[in-house]
């Protein structure tokens, strides 16, 4: 089992963590792992939250987890994490604004971030959830530019629900098809998710470039 994932992910901390997640995915307390990792990934985008939810979905497809609980654990963890990132951004609004009065380049970045959010609306939060790192930058920017919190909470709730459902169901589909091989199920589901994320990003960039023509 380990050798397959190591070959796909590369040796190192991420590979070892992935191996551990797959090996422990049938345990009941794995739901708590999904919750914690989804929360942390929203603030520190180096933790593999989507991978963890997919692995939970694979375990659900094989009958070792409850799919609904996997989705709930991922969605609630991501929701709390996104709101924490928003509050972090909001707490830095004062210092950054004061710096912007002294540095035009900082003011331009703030204006650009606020314009992107206002022009593209809440759907930007939905698509950004599928872009590792991008979602953290956006949620912090929403707080930094003082977007209305009720608006933010509403769209983030939708975003994390779609994200967690997509990742868990994708894992469950392959987990059910390959019940005797969790590793292969995870790898196929992970690569499928990666391909979908790339397509989303390509479409987003094309639409963005078209709007600027």
Image (spheres, rainbow, N blue to C red):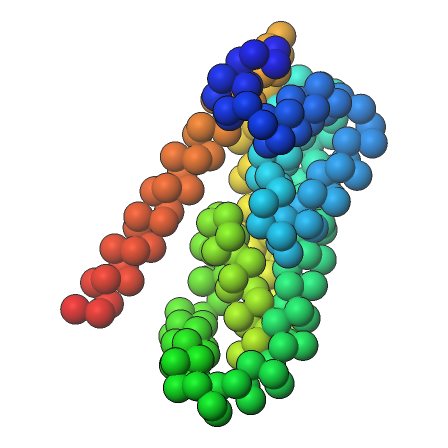
Q: Is residue 60 visible?
A: no
The x and y percentages for residue 175 are 59, 19
Residue at image coords 44%, 80% = 106
Residue at image coords 57%, 67% = 140
Residue at image coords 44%, 86% = 103
Q: Above or below — where is 199 with respect to 129?
A: above
- Foreground of the two, 174 or 3: 3
- Foreground of the two, 201 or 153: 201
Q: Above or below — where is 133 with respect to 198?
A: below
The x and y percentages for residue 14 are 59, 32
The residue lying furthest to the bottom in this view is: 101
The x and y percentages for residue 104 are 39, 86
Q: Above or below — where is 118 with respect to 167?
A: below
Quadrant assignment, res 206: bottom left
Residue at image coords 61%, 14% = 2
Quadrant assignment, res 28: top right
Which corner quadrant holds the C terminus? bottom left
The residue lying furthest to the left in this view is: 213
């Amino acid at each position: 089992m380990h050798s397959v994932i190591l070959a796909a992910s590369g040796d190192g901390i991420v590979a070892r963590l992935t191996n551990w997640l797959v090996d422990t995915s049938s345990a009941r307390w794995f739901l708590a792992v999904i919750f914690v990792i989804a929360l942390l990934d929203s603030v520190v985008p180096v933790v593999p939250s989507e991978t963890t939810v997919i692995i939970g979905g694979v375990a659900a497809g094989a009958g070792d987890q409850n799919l609904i609980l996997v989705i709930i654990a991922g969605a609630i963890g991501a929701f709390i994490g996104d709101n924490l990132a928003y509050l972090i951004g909001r707490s830095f609004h004062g210092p950054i604004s004061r710096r912007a009065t002294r540095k035009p380049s900082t003011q331009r970045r703030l204006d650009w971030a606020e314009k992107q959010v206002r022009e593209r609306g809440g759907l930007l939060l939905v698509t950004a959830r599928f872009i590792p790192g991008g979602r953290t930058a956006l949620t912090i920017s929403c707080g930094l530019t003082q977007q209305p919190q009720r608006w933010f909470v509403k769209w983030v709730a939708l975003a994390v629900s779609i994200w967690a459902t997509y990742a868990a169901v994708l894992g469950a589909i392959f987990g059910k098809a390959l019940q005797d091989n969790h590793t292969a199920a995870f790898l196929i589901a992970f690569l499928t998710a990666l391909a979908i994320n790339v397509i989303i990003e390509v479409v987003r960039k094309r639409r963005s470039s078209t709007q600027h023509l």
